[in-house]
Every structure is written in C-alpha cells, then in structure tokens.
Image: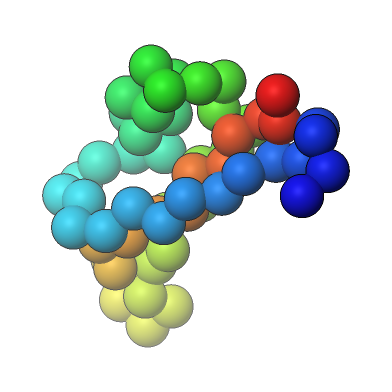
C-alpha cells in the first residue's frame, strides 16, 4: 500500500440513531478521519447498523 494511501475500516453494531459526526468524533482518537459513511436501507431510510470510516494516510 502506498505510504499516503487512506485506510478504511468497517464498523458494525453501531446504534441506529448514531450520526456520522458522532462516529467521526469517536474515531478521531485513533487518527485523522477523512470520511464516515453510514449505510442506510433504501426502502425504510433506517440505518443498517454499520458504517465505513476512512482515515487519512500517514
């Protein structure tokens, strides 16, 4: 992996009412967060309870 490549982690079992901003704040303790993407059910609009957190490369 190139030295400046971003790293993405999968996060499961998150509360359905958590926001992307809240997840970014929690994971910023591990490193600089580039983006957070919570996955939603397209039919209900409800969170699926998992997300992807991308960190800036080091």
Nearer to me, 21 or 32: 32
| Residue displayed at 39% across by 67% down | 40
Q: Which quadrant does the C terminus fall into?
A: top right
Residue situated furthest top in the rendering:
29
Position of 17 with respect to 37 (left or right) is left
Q: Position of residue 33 (x, y in %)?
A: 55, 28
**In this figure, which colouring scheme has been used for the structure?**
rainbow
The answer to whether residue 21 shows anywhere in this view is no
| Residue displayed at 41% across by 38% down | 20
Position of 28 with respect to 55 (left or right) is left
| Residue displayed at 29% across by 68% down | 48
Q: Position of residue 22 (x, y in %)?
A: 33, 28
The answer to whether residue 51 shows anywhere in this view is yes
In the image, residue 57 sits, relative to residue 44, either above or below, namely above
Q: Position of residue 5 (x, y in %)?
A: 77, 41
| Residue displayed at 25% across by 41% down | 18
Quarter of the view holding residue 30: top left
Quarter of the view holding residue 23: top left
Nearer to me, 11 or 20: 11
Position of 6 with respect to 28 (left or right) is right
In the image, residue 8 sits, relative to residue 20, either above or below, namely below
Residue situated furthest bottom in the rendering:
43
Nearer to me, 32 or 14: 32
Q: Give the total of numbered labels.
A: 0
Quarter of the view holding residue 4: top right
């Amino acid at each position: 992996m190139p030295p400046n490549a971003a790293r993405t982690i999968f996060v499961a079992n998150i509360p359905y009412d958590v926001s992307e901003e809240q997840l970014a704040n929690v994971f910023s303790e591990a490193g600089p967060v580039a983006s957070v993407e919570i996955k939603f059910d397209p039919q209900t609009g409800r969170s699926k309870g998992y997300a992807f957190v991308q960190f800036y490369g080091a």
